[in-house]
Structures are given as structure tokens and as C-alpha cells.
Image (tube, rainbow, N blue to C red):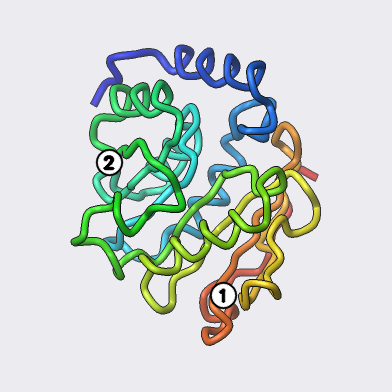
Amino acid sequence: MQSPVPQSFGLKLFLSRVLRNPRRLGAVAPSSRHLGALLAKYASFDDHSPVVELGGGSGSITRALIRGGIDPARIYVIELEPELANYLKISMPLVNVIQGNATDLPHILPPAIIGKVHRIVSGLPMINIPQVVHGQILESCFRIMAPDGAYLQYTYSPRSSINAKAFQLNKKRLGTVFLNLPPATIWGYTKQSFSEESAFPFTPLSHGR
């Protein structure tokens, strides 16, 4: 379906928020198609499970998930900023866009998908968020995921932006994308009761180097 608003409008919205509060968005530019492609690879668990994206922004990762073969009707985007959420709803009407807080997923997602989510993709700037809020976000995420679900987080730091040990999680570096501004690393997190090798059977990749 043709978007009724140009993607450039979403870029302008995104950049206006970067200038207004750069720490809140945590990025200086929307994610590249290369980062989106690698995220889509790891988010593609099967052909029917819902995929939740935290922090939709201008929609670059959402579009990458769709290009990667994920049905837009299976994608649930959580965006805190009302203007960005409204833009996403208009520009991608087949995607489920919810304006809300990532700490409140059990209450804002449809009851029918609770416990059926196998992948959550997050672009939240965790490095700028207090650790107590990390805990609230992660608790919210694992409450709505299937037992073998995995949380995918991309970060602009070479190190994990989440203290996996503190939250009793496995972590695995899934790849670094240098063709992104700035370069980004994707980490996967699973509950310690579940093997991350089973969740992420692929060899970690580096793009653009």
C-alpha cells in the first residue's frame, strides 16, 4: 500500500527531536538499511509469530522488517512520542502502531498476542536510560514473550548496553554494522533458563568492514 505521507516527513520529525533532546532518542540519524537487514534476519523467527519493535522512530527498522519478509500485520511498534506514533500510523497503515511506554507492554499490547511473541527488537537508547528503568523494560518484555523468546537490542557502543548478569540473562553479540551512522552492534538476550545458542544459531556477522 502506498504511503499517504512521504518518508522525508518522518525524517524531519526524527531530526527535530534529535535537536530537541538527543539523549532521549540516542541517535543522530535514522538506522541504515544494513542495520535493518541484520535485525530483520534475527527477528524472523517463523512466519506467523508477532514481532514487537520498541522505539519506532521514523520507521526505518519497521520498513526493514517488512523488506525482510515479515508481514506488517504481525509487527507491533511501540512509540512513546505522539507525533512520531501518528506519523507511523499514517505512513504504514498495515502495521500495528501503539503510542505508549515500553515498560507497560502487558497492558498496551492486545491480549491475544501475550505469550506468543518470540522476538522483540529494540532501538531504545538504553545507554542513556537509568538501570532501574532497564529492569522495568526487560521485565515488561519477558512477561509478554514466549518462554524461548529473545530480546534484540542495537546500540552504538561496542559493549552491551544492558547488564545481562544483573538481570539474569544470557547475552550474545550478533553482529556489528559499520555502514550505519554511528556504527551499531546488535546484542541478543534470553533468559538464563534458555540456551542462547538455540535462540541464535547464526554466526555473528560484521557488515561494511
| Secondary element type, mark 2 | strand
Q: Mark 1 sits on what residue?
A: 201
Q: Residue at x 49, y 52 (%)?
A: 121
Residue 13 percent location from the top left of the image:
50, 16
Quadrant including the C terminus: top right
Q: Quadrant of residue 83?
A: top left
Q: Residue furthest left?
A: 112
Q: Amino acid at mark 1?
A: Pro
The answer to whether 27 is drawn above or below residue 73 in the figure is above
Residue 148 percent location from the top left of the image:
43, 77
Q: Mark 2 sits on what residue?
A: 96
Q: Quadrant of residue 147?
A: bottom left
Residue 87 percent location from the top left of the image:
37, 22
In this rendering, would 105 be left or right of 167? left
Q: Quadrant of residue 100?
A: top left
The answer to whether 34 is drawn above or below residue 16 in the figure is below
Q: Residue at x 63, y 17 (%)?
A: 20
In this rendering, would 110 be left or right of 190? left
The first of marks 1 and 2 along the sequence is 2
**Marks 1 and 2 in Cβ contact (< 8 Å):** no
Query: Can you tell which of label 1 and label 2 is closer to the viewer?
Result: 2
Q: Residues within 10 Å of mark 1 (few under 14, many from 20)?
A: few
| Residue nearest the viewer, comparing 185 with 137 | 137
In this rendering, would 24 be left or right of 87? right
| Secondary element type, mark 1 | loop
